[in-house]
Image: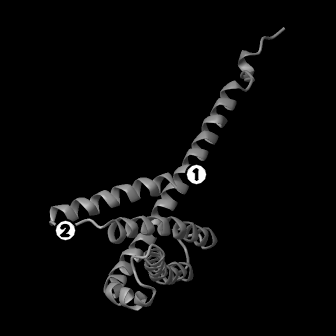
Amino acid sequence: PVGWTVGAASYLLHNRAAGVAQGSDTGWQLDILYDFLYAVDWAVFTAIILAHVRRHWLEPDASPRVWLAHAGFALVIAPAQILTTYTLHCLSLIALGLLPPGDWSVFFHRVGGSMVGLSFTGFFYYWVVLGLFYAIAYRQLYLAKHAEAVRARLEHLRAPRQPHFRFIPLN
């Protein structure tokens, strides 16, 4: 949650700075609300992605079936995430009275082109989330193996030594 909050805040600030630099007005209901919903939606979808990753673990020698499962899931999850974000945005605008209930089709017609482009972005984000998950998982595995090796070495150093037969005193 903290990572997504920081990411969402930086994304929001970047988009608003770019908008100001281009001379466009910042509308909270169209820009800031959408960016907030986008970040919240990705936080939820990240949990779904991680559940899928845990079921279909990618090893370096993973079968093509596992890779296809991830590619297929990414192709489904990316448009679903964008559609969910725009649906939440539309419903929020209707609830706030900023969009008449009958204009939802106009709203989706207006944002239809960006839904396709953002689906490609979502596909890319899927693989970024996957990569970050494996980076963290392998780091934890490395740290556990390293701690085990250190513990084994310390046990070896603390173990009582049996002297060589030449050093045994003769009576």
Q: Is residue 74 above or below residue 7?
A: below
Image coords of residue 125 (percent x, y): 41, 70
> Where is mark 2, residue-wise?
24
Q: Which residue is mark 1?
A: 141
Image disc number at residue 11: none
Of residue 65 and residue 150, the one placed in the foreground of this image is 65
Element class at badge 2:
loop
Q: x, y percentage for residue 64?
A: 52, 82
- Residue at the (55%, 74%) spot, across then down: 62
Q: Residues within 10 Å of mark 1 (few under 14, many from 20)?
A: few
What residue occupies the far top of the structure in this picture? 171
Q: Amino acid at mark 1?
A: Leu
As rendered, which of 125 and 132 lies closer to the eye?
125
User: Looking at the image, which is closer to me, 103 or 150?
Assistant: 103
Question: What colour scheme was applied to this rendering of the protein?
Answer: one colour
- Give coordinates of residue 111: x percent, y percent: 34, 84
Q: Amino acid at mark 2?
A: Ser
Q: Up-down: is 26 above or below 108?
A: above
* Residue 99 x/y as whole percent: 40, 81
Task: State which quadrant residue 52 falls in.
Answer: bottom right
In the rendered structure, the answer to whether residue 141 lies left or right of residue 12 reads right
For the residue carrying disc 2, how many other residues have a C-alpha within 10 Å: few (<14), some (14-19), or many (20+)?
few
Cα separation, mark 2 vs mark 1, equals 48 Å
The answer to whether residue 79 is left or right of residue 106 is right
